[in-house]
Amino acid sequence: MAQAGVVNAAMYRSILVPVDGSEHSANAVREAARLASGNDARLVFLHVIPPSGRQALREEAEERAWSIIDQAVSIAGHAGAERHIATDGSPSHAILEAPRHGLCDVIVMGARRLGGVRGALLGSQTQKVLEKATVPVLVVH
């Protein structure tokens, strides 16, 4: 029997880790790598680029996105991890679509603590994912 509060990584085959280059997402990467190690779970990194009408801005954002993902792969030590960039919609929307397309069976993401009423406990994107996810979500501080 599993202990309360302990996540059994063996039950997961694919771990989605949304990354944005922040320390919060780096913490999530480390935790996801820990969950994946010693198991057959694969890591899937996702960075979401906000839509932009200007091609030059979009190309610059894509270069930065690949750099952020490469940094996550380096932190995790999983060179074979899948890498995805989404350019359509909000981060929460892209994250919520991943399990619907079979990319993951658990989401590990960083908590963005924001001030004010809107982000009193967690960042708004994290809160949206927690409310609407169809798979388990592990939020890492």
Image (tube, rainbow, N blue to C red):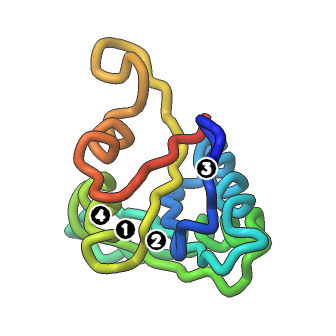
Q: CA distance from mark 3 to mark 4?
A: 24 Å
Q: Residues within 10 Å of mark 3 (few under 14, many from 20)?
A: few
**Kind of residue indicated by mark 1:** Leu
Seen from the viewer's position, the closer of residues 106 and 54 is: 106
Q: Which mark is residue 132?
A: none
Q: Secondary structure at mark 4?
A: helix
Q: Quadrant of the C terminus?
A: top right
From the top left corner, tell me how far across and down residue 20 is, in percent. Answer: 52, 54
Task: Name which of mark 4 and mark 1 comes first in the sequence.
Answer: 1
**Kind of residue indicated by mark 2:** Glu
Q: Residues within 10 Å of mark 2 (few under 14, many from 20)?
A: few
Q: CA distance from mark 4 to mark 1?
A: 20 Å
Task: Name which of mark 3 and mark 2 comes first in the sequence.
Answer: 3
Q: Secondary structure at mark 3?
A: loop
Of badges 4 and 1, nearer the viewer stands 4
Q: For mark 4, what is the residue?
A: 94
**Kind of residue indicated by mark 3:** Val
Q: CA distance from mark 3 to mark 2?
A: 38 Å
Q: For mark 3, what is the residue?
A: 7
Identify the residue at horizontal 61%, vertical 50% (top origin): 7
Task: Name which of mark 4 and mark 2 comes first in the sequence.
Answer: 2
Answer with left or right where residue 4 lies relative to residue 49: right
Q: CA distance from mark 2 to mark 1?
A: 5 Å
**Kind of residue indicated by mark 4:** Ala
Q: For mark 1, what is the residue?
A: 57
Contact, mark 1 vs mark 3 (Cβ under 8 Å):
no
Answer with left or right where residue 32 lies relative to residue 47: right
